Image: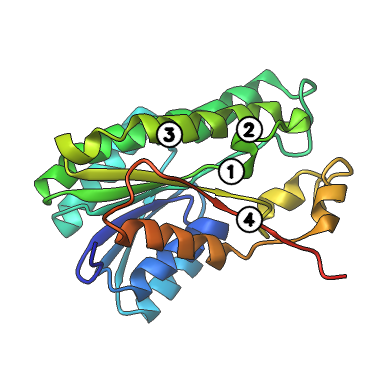
Amino acid sequence: MELSGRVAVVTGAASGIGRATALALAAAGCRGVVLADLHSCEETASGVKAHRAEPLFVETDVGDLDSLRTLFARCEEVFGRLDVLHNNAGLGEGAGVWPEVAPERCAAIVDVNLRGVVLGTQLALEPMRRSGGGAIVHTASGAATVPLPPQAVYAATKAGVAHFTRSCAPLAESHGVRVNCVCPGLVDTPMVLETGGGQPAEWLRPFHDAVTLLRPEEVAEAVIALVRDESQVAAVVNVENAPAAS
C-alpha cells in the first residue's frame, strides 16, 4: 500500500510503540493520523505535525465498544476515510504476578489486549471497504508463543491476538482488508518498568539483561513494512531482540 494521502488510526498512541508508529506513518506520507488513547497524546501530535500530517486525538478506551465506535466515527467525520489501523494498545499484569493479580486487573488485560483488537478490527472493516480496502496490524508479543508464567494473562491474550490474525485471512478477499501482526520481544517502553514498579521485575531481570532491548521505532518499522507489502496476509512476524553486548 502506498501511504501518501492515507488516513491511519493508532491505538495506544501516547507512548512507546504506538507513538513510534504514529510518527512513522506521518513520515511515510499519511495525511491524517488519529491518535487513540486514554492519556494525552500531545507529544505524539506534535511529532505528527512536524511531518506535515494532521493529528486527531480521540480519547478512547479500546475495551469499551461505544468508545471504539466513537473513534471510527470521528475518523470518518474528520478525514472522510480509513486506510490503516494499528491495534497497539496493550496492558500487562504490571507489578503483580499470576495468580496474585487482582481479578479486576485480569479483566482489564483481556478487555484491552484481546477484546479491543477483535472489536477494533470488526469496526474498521466497513470504513476501510468504503475507502477501497485497507491494512490492519496488531501488536502481539513474543509471549504469544513462549510460556510466561508471571504474566500468564498477558501471554494468553497475545496468543489470542496471533491466532485471531491468522483467522482473519479471508478478510483480504471479502473486504479488501489485510490483517497481520507483529510479535516483538522486549521493547524499551514503560510497560517493562511497570513490572517492577519503576524498574524491571526480578523475574524479568534474566531476560532483560540477556538481550538488547528493542527500540519502539524498530517495531514501528515492522508495522510499516506489513502495511506496505500487499503480499502479506495473516502474517505473524517476530521482531526479535539481539543478544546483549558482551
The earlier-in-sequence mark between 3 and 1 is 3
Which residue is label 1 attached to?
Answer: 141
- Give percent across and percent down for residue 58: 36, 51
Question: Outermost residue toward the front?
Answer: 231
Q: What residue type is labelled 1?
A: Ser
Q: Name the residue type under label 4.
A: Glu
Checking the image for residue 240, the label placed there is 4
Is 116 on the left-hand or right-hand side of 190? Answer: left
- Is 165 drawn above or below residue 80 in the view shown? above
| Label 4, residues with CA under 10 Å away: few <14, some 14-19, many ≥20 | some
Whole-angstrom CA distance, mark 4 to mark 2, is 18 Å
Q: In which quarter of the image is the C terminus?
A: bottom right
Labels 4 and 3: the sequence-earlier one: 3
Mark linked to residue 116: 3
Is label 3 in a helix, a strand or a loop?
Answer: helix
Look at 76% across and 25% down and name the residue there.
98
Q: Are marks 4 and 2 in contact (CB under 8 Å)?
A: no
Disc nearer the start of the sequence (4/1):
1
N-terminal of the pair, mark 1 or mark 2, is 1
Whether residue 177 is visible here, answered yes or no, is yes
Crowdedness near tag 3: few (<14), some (14–19) or many (≥20) residues, C-alpha within 10 Å: many
Which kind of residue does numbered mark 2 sit on? Answer: Tyr
Residue at horizontal 47 percent and vertical 56 percent from the top: 13
Q: In this view, does 169 lie above or below 241?
A: above
Please identify the quarter of the rendering in which residue 142 is found: top right
Q: Distance between the residues labelled 3 and 1?
A: 15 Å
Callouts 4 and 1 close, C-beta under 8 Å: no
Measure how far apart labels 3 and 2 are at the Cα level.
14 Å
Q: Label 2 near label 1: C-beta < 8 Å?
A: yes
Q: Whole-percent x and y of residue 24? A: 42, 69
Dot 2 corresponds to which residue?
154
